């Protein structure tokens, strides 16, 4: 692992103070298309003014919308984030949705943005048969190698674990991968970020499994609060378990949830929930991001882009009474704490 007190990026270790404003849950390069669609030779649908709303409202209805594999375009999008004052993007594209470490390194060099890559695997529906059959021990060893040696056939190392994909109910592979991730976390001290199943009981089950496997709950992030809970009090209850709760749908303001039925919040409603967490003394257990995983959300395609939090949400925070210290906690301090690899008790 990197020396104690460093953050591992796709270009190597950096000092934590160099991260700046950080997006904790994004996809610069990924392929979330269903496996059958990936095998089709039919070309992607161009996003135009005529279908831009449909591409946001029903993202799966626009062929290729879930495919972000254009390194040049992603570099330009990262430059826009840097121009807005951004410093670091955490790319949580894990096994099954086509991680591209070399592409991320190119993006980082071309944009000046630090990029941190996640280790591990996404949900079972995106895995091949060989991967689905791997035991806990093999999955743990893969994650450890991705952190210590290099990921997906490269020497580019991951800087955290996840997003580990979980469904509801948990598939057998997902449970094994979750246990493996927690065991790897216990050995390395790396932060662990988890995509929970779409049920309010899922995050609590996940924390129980992580704890039983020896993971560190205080360095475990439960993603997607925006579509998992519909009562701010439930988010407060989860944060009181000691984990980090993540609102990572900033920029998505639609009543149509593409993956099921959910009353998605607006950005202001997200901030209202976060305000409640700060008021409960839990402000340091909150992470925020956009979870961009479709072309329609890129600035070059008419979307809000990776700079939305800095360009639009931070002013909204100030309007709604957030202090500068609270804003820096969300965008700088908490990401820096989570991404810094600890020394004590970690394998080196």
Image (tube, rainbow, N blue to C red):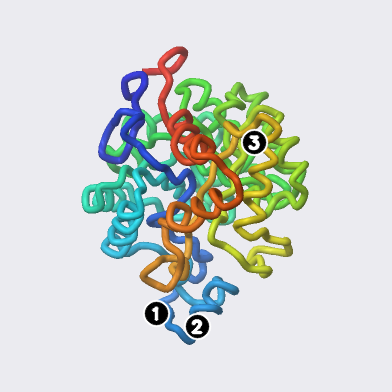
Figure quadrant of the N terminus? top left
Label 2: state its secondary structure.
loop
Q: Residue at x 58, y 25 (%)?
A: 215
From the viewer's perspective, tell me whether residue 321 is left or right of residue 51. Answer: right
Closer-to-camera residue (110/166): 110
Q: Which residue is mark 3?
A: 278
Q: Residue at x 30, y 65 (%)?
A: 73
Image marks 1 and 3: residues in contact by CB distance under 8 Å: no
Depth check, mark 1 against mark 3: the one in front is 3
Could you say where residue 302 lies in the image, as x and y percent from the top left?
43, 73
In the depicted structure, whether residue 20 falls above or below residue 254: above
Label 1: state its secondary structure.
loop
Q: Is residue 128 visible?
A: no
Image marks 2 and 1: residues in contact by CB distance under 8 Å: no
- Picture quadrant where residue 31 is located: bottom left
Q: CA distance from mark 1 to mark 3?
A: 47 Å
Could you say where residue 53 lies in the image, as x and y percent from the top left?
54, 78
Label total for image:
3
Which residue appears farthest toward the bottom when viewing the image?
Answer: 50
Q: Earlier in the sequence, mark 3 or mark 2?
A: 2
Which residue appears farthest toward the top when viewing the image?
Answer: 344
Could you say where residue 336 lies in the image, as x and y percent from the top left?
43, 32
Say few, some or many: other residues with alpha carbon within 10 Å of mark 3 (under 14 / 14 to 19 / 20 or more). some
Q: Residue at x 42, y 47 (%)?
A: 91
Q: Which residue is mark 1?
A: 43
In the depicted structure, whether residue 12 falls above or below residue 259: above
Image marks 3 and 2: residues in contact by CB distance under 8 Å: no
Depth check, mark 2 against mark 1: the one in front is 2
Q: Which residue is mark 2?
A: 51
Q: Residue at x 42, y 62 (%)?
A: 305
Depth check, mark 3 against mark 2: the one in front is 3
């Amino acid at each position: 692992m990197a020396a104690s007190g460093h953050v591992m990026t796709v270009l190597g270790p950096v000092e934590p103070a160099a991260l700046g404003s950080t997006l904790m849950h994004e996809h610069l390069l990924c392929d979330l298309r269903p496996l059958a669609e990936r095998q089709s030779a039919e070309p992607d649908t161009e996003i135009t003014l005529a279908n831009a709303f449909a591409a946001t409202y029903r993202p799966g209805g626009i062929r290729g919308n879930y495919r972000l594999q254009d390194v040049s375009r992603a570099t330009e999008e990262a430059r826009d984030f840097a121009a807005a004052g951004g410093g670091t993007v955490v790319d949580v594209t894990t096994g099954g949705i086509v991680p591209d470490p070399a592409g991320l390194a190119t993006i980082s060099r071309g944009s000046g943005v630090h990029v941190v890559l996640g280790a591990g695997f996404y949900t079972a529906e995106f895995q091949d048969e060989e991967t689905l059959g791997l035991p806990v021990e093999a999955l743990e060893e893969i994650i450890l190698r991705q952190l210590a040696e290099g990921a997906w056939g490269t020497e580019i190392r991951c800087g955290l674990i996840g997003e580990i994909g979980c469904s509801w109910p948990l598939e057998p592979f997902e449970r094994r991968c979750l246990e493996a991730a927690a065991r790897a976390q216990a050995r390395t001290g790396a932060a662990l970020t988890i995509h929970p199943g779409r049920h309010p009981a899922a995050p609590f089950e996940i924390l129980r499994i992580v704890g039983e496997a020896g993971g560190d709950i205080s360095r475990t992030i439960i993603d997607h609060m925006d579509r998992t809970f519909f009562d701010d009090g439930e988010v407060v209850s989860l944060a009181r378990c000691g984990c980090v709760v993540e609102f990572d749908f900033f920029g998505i303001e639609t009543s149509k949830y593409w993956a099921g039925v959910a009353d998605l919040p607006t950005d202001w409603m997200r901030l209202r929930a976060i305000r409640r967490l700060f008021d409960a003394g839990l402000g340091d257990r909150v992470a925020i991001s956009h979870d961009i995983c479709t072309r329609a959300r890129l600035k070059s395609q008419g979307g809000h882009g990776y700079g939305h939090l800095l360009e639009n949400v931070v002013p909204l925070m100030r309007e709604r009474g957030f202090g500068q210290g609270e804003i820096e906690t969300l965008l700088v301090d908490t990401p820096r704490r989570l991404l810094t690899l600890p020394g004590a008790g970690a394998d080196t």
